[in-house]
Each structure stands twice: as C-alpha cells, then as structure tokens.
Image (tube, rainbow, N blue to C red):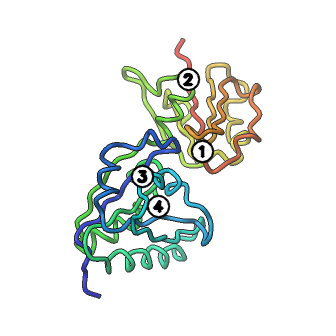
C-alpha cells in the first residue's frame, strides 16, 4: 500500500466536560481532513466523539473499532485494520481519544505502528481523568518530595502501598477486595470518582469502611489513595 496520509494527530479530548477541550485540540480538529473516532463496539456511542461533536459539525468522521478485549494477539488485527484505514487517507487526519493520548490510551497502539511506517505523528495533550478526579475530590495529588504511583486495575497494590504517598488506581473493578491490604490501617484516605466532569459525576472520599464500592465498579471510575504523614 502506498502511504498517502501526510500527518496524523493523536488528540486527547479530555474526560467529559466539553469546556475542558483545549484550544489546541479544537484548532487541530477543525483543520484536519478527517477525524477518526474509536469505538469499542459497532453501533455503540463513542465517549470521545460525544465530547467533540458540537465543535465538528460537517467534518468527515470515520470509526475505528477497538473492542475491549485483553488478548493482544486478537487486538493486533484491529490495530492493523485501523492503521490501514489511516494510511490510505490523503492529507492530515486526527485520531481522538478520551483523556490524554500518552496515558493508557487506545491511540498508543496505532501510534507505534504509524511511527514504524515513518508517518509524522503529533500529539495534542488532553486533560487526564487523574487530574480531573483530583480536582473533583478537591485534593492535591502530591506535594514537595512526595511520590506518586499509577496502577492499572490496582495490580500488585500490596507491593507499592508503603512506598508511595499517593497511589492512583485506574479502572476500579473489585477495588474493595484489592484494598484489603489497608483494611486495618488508619493512615490512608481513599477518594473515588466516577465519570469525572460528566453531569452524572459521583464523588466520595473517606476511610475504607465508610465507602460503598459497588457504586464505583465502572470503567470510567478511578481511585486515589493518599497516605497521611504523621
């Protein structure tokens, strides 16, 4: 296949509130020839597109299918299909993603393939759910010489709980069970945020035994665990 695409922008569109879309993101989305929108299932609404749709009326939009499966061998087929769609475009295109393209984004997999093909890629940062959640909880993530750790699904939490002042857990399924390592400790506080900056945002902060975790068993939920310094 002959490469026609001139340039690809990986555009972070933030977390939900349309007003948090950056000026740079708007500028890029308005000037590109096509916008690619990730979807997890055909016919399912794209959260990323819902954020930008009021600003891109009349633009050429095409979906890229990235199913929510963990098998990387199966996923490769979808990444390669997305790559082929992007490469055949003429001019400049954007691939949008919720949050920021550099942090656990679907775009990162296609990004690697594009660079391998020698395609020019530019990243446009977006507001991550991590920062939006800290703002929703009205707490700083870290200060001074404090250390921060990010764990997807809370993996290996017991290894890091005493090494870091703040731990972020992305995707909070079965979180109550994972947090059993701090069950009998009073030097930690937990903040949970579901659908940060959306109209139905839900926030709670407290000790382990004060929280109903069932309400936050959601793909768009995040936990911030902070240790008190004595």
Furthest toward the front, the residue is 58
Q: Quadrant of residue 120?
A: bottom left
According to the picture, the residue beneath numbered tag 2 turns out to be 227
Report x, y in % for residue 57: 43, 59
Label 4 Cα neighbours within 10 Å, binned few <14 / some 14-19 / many ≥20: many
Q: Is residue 104 visible?
A: no
According to the picture, the residue beneath numbered tag 4 turns out to be 106
Foreground of the two, 55 or 221: 55
Q: Is residue 9 left or right of residue 131?
A: left
- Residue at (71, 28) in percent of width and height: 208
Tags 1 and 2 in contact by the CB under 8 Å rule?
no
According to the picture, the residue beneath numbered tag 1 turns out to be 154
Q: Earlier in the sequence, mark 3 or mark 2?
A: 3
Question: Helix or strand or loop: what does disc 3 sit on?
Answer: helix
Task: Tell me the quarter of the image containing the C terminus.
Answer: top right
Q: Is residue 81 above or below residue 178?
A: below
Q: Quadrant of residue 69?
A: bottom right
Report x, y in % for residue 53: 48, 55
Distance CA(mark 3)–CA(mark 2): 41 Å
């Amino acid at each position: 296949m002959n490469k026609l695409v001139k340039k690809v922008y990986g555009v972070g569109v933030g977390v939900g509130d349309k007003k948090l879309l950056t000026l740079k993101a708007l500028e890029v989305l308005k000037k590109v020839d096509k916008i690619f929108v990730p979807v997890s299932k055909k016919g399912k609404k794209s959260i990323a597109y819902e954020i930008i749709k009021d600003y891109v009326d009349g633009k050429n939009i095409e979906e890229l299918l990235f199913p929510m499966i963990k098998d990387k061998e199966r996923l490769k087929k979808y990444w390669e299909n997305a790559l082929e769609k992007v490469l055949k475009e003429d001019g400049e295109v954007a691939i949008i993603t919720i949050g920021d393209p550099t942090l656990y984004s679907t775009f990162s997999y296609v990004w690697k393939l594009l660079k391998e093909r020698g395609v020019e890629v530019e990243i446009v940062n977006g507001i991550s759910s991590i920062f939006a959640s800290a703002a929703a909880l009205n707490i700083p993530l870290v200060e001074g010489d404090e250390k921060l750790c990010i764990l997807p699904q809370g993996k290996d939490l017991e290894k890091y709980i005493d090494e870091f002042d703040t731990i972020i857990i992305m995707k909070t399924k079965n979180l109550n069970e994972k947090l059993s390592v701090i069950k009998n400790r009073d030097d930690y506080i937990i903040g949970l945020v579901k659908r940060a900056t959306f109209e139905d945002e839900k926030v709670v902060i407290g000790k382990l035994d004060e929280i109903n975790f069932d309400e936050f068993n959601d793909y768009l939920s995040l936990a911030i665990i902070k240790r008190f310094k004595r």
